[in-house]
Amino acid sequence: MFTGIIAASSKITSAKKTPGGMLISLNTPIGWKVKVGDSIIVNGVCSTAKKVGKQIEFFYMPETLAKSAAGSLKIGDLVNLEQSMRPSDRLDGHIVQGHVDTTGKIAKIGKRGDSYVLEVAPVLKDKSLMKLLAPKGSIAIDGISLTVVDVFKNSFTVNLIPYTWEVTDLHTKKVGNLVNLEFDVLAKYLKRLIPQIHR
């Protein structure tokens, strides 16, 4: 389990597709102690450390590549990182599982005062899933816990304070880029338990 509060960022040092999936490596953040088998969220994807040292290696299976933007990662890309939370940690963001639901395409990037405004269009076969989004509700974009501002028919907006913009990968994104999206787990359970509200 994660909180969506990004603890560090790192650059991809290796990205190799294999017949069975994909291997990526990245530089271990300064001060991080990581063991083989540890769960680390990488741009919103819950990833298991396969090899550790100066670099951490992860393997992504086909299902992960199909549901997320992990397959488009390349050497030099900046990614957001967060280690799994401990029971004593503060939940400063919201409950993030690292289970990416879909990708989203960045439709607009703008500014409102000192904050940044991002409009994202989820890539959805089932448009009713847009009902999982609610103004002032939570969404994880590339693993970042953010508050939804407005919800439209096929897109939604979030605002980012300068700090979040600068210390995460979002400042490297351009219109048309894909990001990983994880809807609020509480909304997903409600959809499952009360399906009629999504008709």
Image: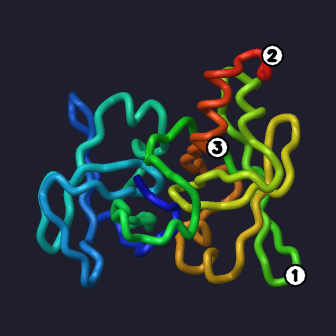
Q: CA distance from mark 2 to mark 1?
A: 38 Å
Against 69, residue 199 (above or below) is above
* Residue bearing the label numbered 1: 113
Q: Amino acid at mark 1?
A: Gly
**Where is residue 20 shown, x and y percent of the image?**
22, 29
Q: Amino acid at mark 2?
A: Arg
Q: CA distance from mark 1 to mark 3?
A: 25 Å
Against 158, residue 21 (above or below) is above
Instruction: State if disc 1 and disc 2 touch (CB < 8 Å).
Output: no
Residue drawn at point x = 29 percent, y = 77 percent: 29
* Residue bearing the label numbered 3: 104
Sequence order check: which comes first, mark 2 or mark 1?
Answer: 1
Sequence order check: which comes first, mark 2 or mark 3?
Answer: 3
**Where is residue 146 shown, x and y percent of the image?**
66, 61
| Secondary structure of the residue carrying numbered label 1 | loop
| Secondary structure of the residue carrying numbered label 3 | strand
* Residue bearing the label numbered 2: 199
Q: Nearer the viewer, mark 2 or mark 1?
A: 2
Q: Quadrant of residue 27?
A: bottom left
Residue drawn at point x = 37 percent, y = 72 percent: 10
Left or right of 84? Residue 190 is: right
Question: Which quadrant, please, contains the C terminus?
Answer: top right
Label 3 Cα crowd, 10 Å radius (few <14 / some 14-19 / many 20+)? many
Left or right of 91? Residue 50 is: left
Q: Amino acid at mark 3?
A: Gly
